[in-house]
């Protein structure tokens, strides 16, 4: 069945905003400007401040949630699906995980390319699968275990491509290795966050937009307050500011004053994360989780292609192989092979189609309903 214009709009919105999210963050990292007190020009390396901006974008999802709820109320749907009360503090643990994982990933983005950053984020499948078995009591299918193994192989190939592309520069090589390891470490934390979110969202029937917005509120407030002690904590080689501290928000604002385009990059990051979350949830509801996974994979291709065009990184053929293996692993884990197998079986035996429709007949309720 053909997609409607609204579904095409949602798919395009998810692809575009998801790509802008990573590209705008990397664009901000690439700027060089003077800081406070007439300090010499240096890169805009302020990962924790960027993470605060990302949480501000997530926080705005609460506004989208309440707008949708008002719309549903105006259509008379609120009485049929009354909102379930829950303690917002339930989302504090996943918010802390999100805050930690996101901050580490922004640190890592300064050390590696945007395409490798996006590809290595696929490691979350490995840890999500293992943690769901350990803490949610799930049993993974054979295809999911194969997907995890394929993802591990893909990560090895992508990491090897990074090493080979920087083998002639020892400083860059060590930086890339550190960045890749930080991304994978962050995916462990993100996997814990996802397991906690799934447990709380399904148990308390919380709408995903409300969950994202609540976590964004916690992350924005907590990380904003942490910027104060970070201003004084020495960070050594991990620091990208002249004072050598963990984060220097004042230096960031001074650099913005010297180079106003940094504001455009930061606003692109904040706005894109809000629209990306809304579009992703809507795609899952209007189309399917499989479609969302495919669009997320296309996002990696867009980020990779634009990074090459902009000259942010050099092409390495091993990245193609690594991406294809990662894509295979993601497809196996998310069950994308099943509709393909069904399609093949239908083409072989058309007479069985009517019987299958009778067995699987009926309407399917949307995953996410506006409450």
Image: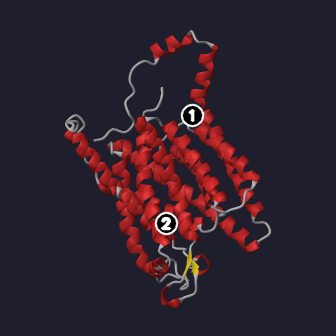
Q: Residues within 10 Å of mark 2 (few under 14, many from 20)?
A: many
Q: Residue at x 53, y 14 (%)?
A: 353
Quadrant in the picture for residue 160? bottom right
Q: Secondary structure at mark 2?
A: helix
Residue closest to the eye, 143 or 46? 46
- Residue 308, compared with residue 228, is above or below; it is above
Quadrant in the picture for residue 187? bottom right
Q: Position of residue 14 (x, y in %)?
A: 47, 47
What numbered label is drawn on residue 40?
none
Can I make out residue 138 in this image? no
**Image position of 185 (left or right of 276):** right
What numbered label is drawn on residue 335?
1
Can I make out residue 3 in this image? yes
Q: Residue at x 46, y 67 (%)?
A: 264
Q: Hey, which residue is sitting farthest right in the picture?
A: 168
Q: Position of residue 142 (x, y in %)?
A: 62, 33
The residues tagged by marks 1 and 2 sit, at their Cα atoms, a distance apart of 36 Å
Choose mark 1 or mark 2, whichever is in front: 2
Task: Looking at the image, tell me whether mark 1 or mark 2 is earlier in sequence order.
Answer: 2
Residue ID for mark 2: 265
**Image position of 2 (left or right of 150):** left
**Image position of 209 (left or right of 195):** left
């Amino acid at each position: 069945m053909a997609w409607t214009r609204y579904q095409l709009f949602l798919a395009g919105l998810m692809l575009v905003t998801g790509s802008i999210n990573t590209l705008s963050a990397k664009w901000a990292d690439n700027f060089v400007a003077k800081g406070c007190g007439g300090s010499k020009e240096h890169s805009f390396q302020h990962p924790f401040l960027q993470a605060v901006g990302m949480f501000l974008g997530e926080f705005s999802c609460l506004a989208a949630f309440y707008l949708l709820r008002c719309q549903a109320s105006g259509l008379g749907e609120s009485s049929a699906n009354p909102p379930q009360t829950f303690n917002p503090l339930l989302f504090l643990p996943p918010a802390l995980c999100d805050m930690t994982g996101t901050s580490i990933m922004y640190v890592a983005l300064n050390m590696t390319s945007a395409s490798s950053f996006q590809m290595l984020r696929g490691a979350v499948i490995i840890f999500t699968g293992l943690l769901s078995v350990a803490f949610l009591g799930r049993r993974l299918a054979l295809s999911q275990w194969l997907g995890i193994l394929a993802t591990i192989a893909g990560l090895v190939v992508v990491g090897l491509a990074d090493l080979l592309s920087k083998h002639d520069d020892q400083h860059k090589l060590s930086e890339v290795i550190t960045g890749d390891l930080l991304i994978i470490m962050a995916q462990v934390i993100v996997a814990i966050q996802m397991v906690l979110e799934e447990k709380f969202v399904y148990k308390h029937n919380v709408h995903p937009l409300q969950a994202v917005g609540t976590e964004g509120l916690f992350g924005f407030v907590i990380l904003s307050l942490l910027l104060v002690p970070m201003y004084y904590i020495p960070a050594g080689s991990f620091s990208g500011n002249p004072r050598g501290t963990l984060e220097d928000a004042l230096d960031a604002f001074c650099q913005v004053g010297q180079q106003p385009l940094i504001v455009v990059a930061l606003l692109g990051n904040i706005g894109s994360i809000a629209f990306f979350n809304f579009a992703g949830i809507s795609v899952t509801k209007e189309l399917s989780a499989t479609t969302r996974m495919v669009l997320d994979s296309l996002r990696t291709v867009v980020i990779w292609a634009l990074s090459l065009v902009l000259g942010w990184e050099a092409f390495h053929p091993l990245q193609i192989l690594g991406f294809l293996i990662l894509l295979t692993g993601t497809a196996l884990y998310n069950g994308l092979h099943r509709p393909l197998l069904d399609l093949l079986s239908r083409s072989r035996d058309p007479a069985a189609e009517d019987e299958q429709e009778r067995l699987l007949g009926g309407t399917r309720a949307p995953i996410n309903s506006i409450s």
